[in-house]
Image (spheres, rainbow, N blue to C red):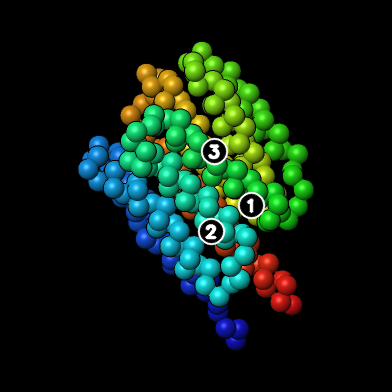
Amino acid sequence: MHEQRTATLPTWTWGFAPYVVLSVVHVVALGLGADSLAGPTKLLLMPALAIAVLWAGRGTAWGSPFSLLFVAIALSWLGDGAATFFPFAPELPVMLGCFGLAHLAYIWLFARVLPTRSLPAWTVVYALWWGILLAVLWPRLGALTVAVAIYGVVLAGTAATAASTNRIITIGAAFFLASDTLLAFRLFTPEAMPPVTSPLVMLTYTVGQGLIAAGVVIAVRLRERTTAR
């Protein structure tokens, strides 16, 4: 008789459990309007993700993939807490700046460090996304028009270059893009967005960041196994 095998998750994935729990608590708190819980949990998300990567990366060589991932996570954390960390500055420009730099780190990671294939032709959809989003929001952007346009370029760049890596990173970057798209409409067309938009922004954001981080770990581990053969 053949031995029956059951699929099990790699042990390194358990390091993501605290991040998943925090993400769920944060999204639910937003949905319930529990600001006293939503605020602190938001600031704990990226540190929990960084700890997850530290755990998942045990036993691997700590090279540029993890370094760039940690840079992106740290900049995302600053963007999440822009109002807390930079109370002396306008929140939205600071947030855009921090996340813009995070996306540049992701683009370098996906395009220069982890690519496994050429950029698929279908990624042209992200250029179309940028054009449509800018056209729809243009009348509402005012002094932020240039900043939002540039930020849109790096957002599209992250999503597109992610498609040259593995499927997990590609899906994660698409969720990240969805989060920022929802956020843009919530910020600039608040009257058209339902209350559920805020939890959806953070749900897609946490899923996106988590999948990107897990995808990078998978890519590094696969590369090391391939090299060792």
Compared with 114, 151 (above or below) is above
Residue placed under numbered mark 1 in the picture: 109
Position of residue 224 in the picture relative to residue 87 (left or right): right
Q: Residue at x 76, y 39 (%)?
A: 121
Check the image and name the residue furthest to the top. Answer: 139
Q: Residue at x 40, y 56 (%)?
A: 47
Helix, strand or loop at mark 2: helix
Helix, strand or loop at mark 1: helix
What's the distance in space between the residues labelled 2 and 1, CA to CA? Answer: 14 Å
**Residue 87 sits in quarter:** top left
Compared with 198, 59 (above or below) is below
**Tag on residue 214?**
2
Helix, strand or loop at mark 3: helix
The answer to whether mark 2 and mark 3 are in CB contact below 8 A is no
Q: Nearer the viewer, mark 2 or mark 3?
A: 3
Check disc 1 and give the amino acid type: Leu
Residue placed under numbered mark 3 in the picture: 100
Q: Earlier in the sequence, mark 3 or mark 1?
A: 3
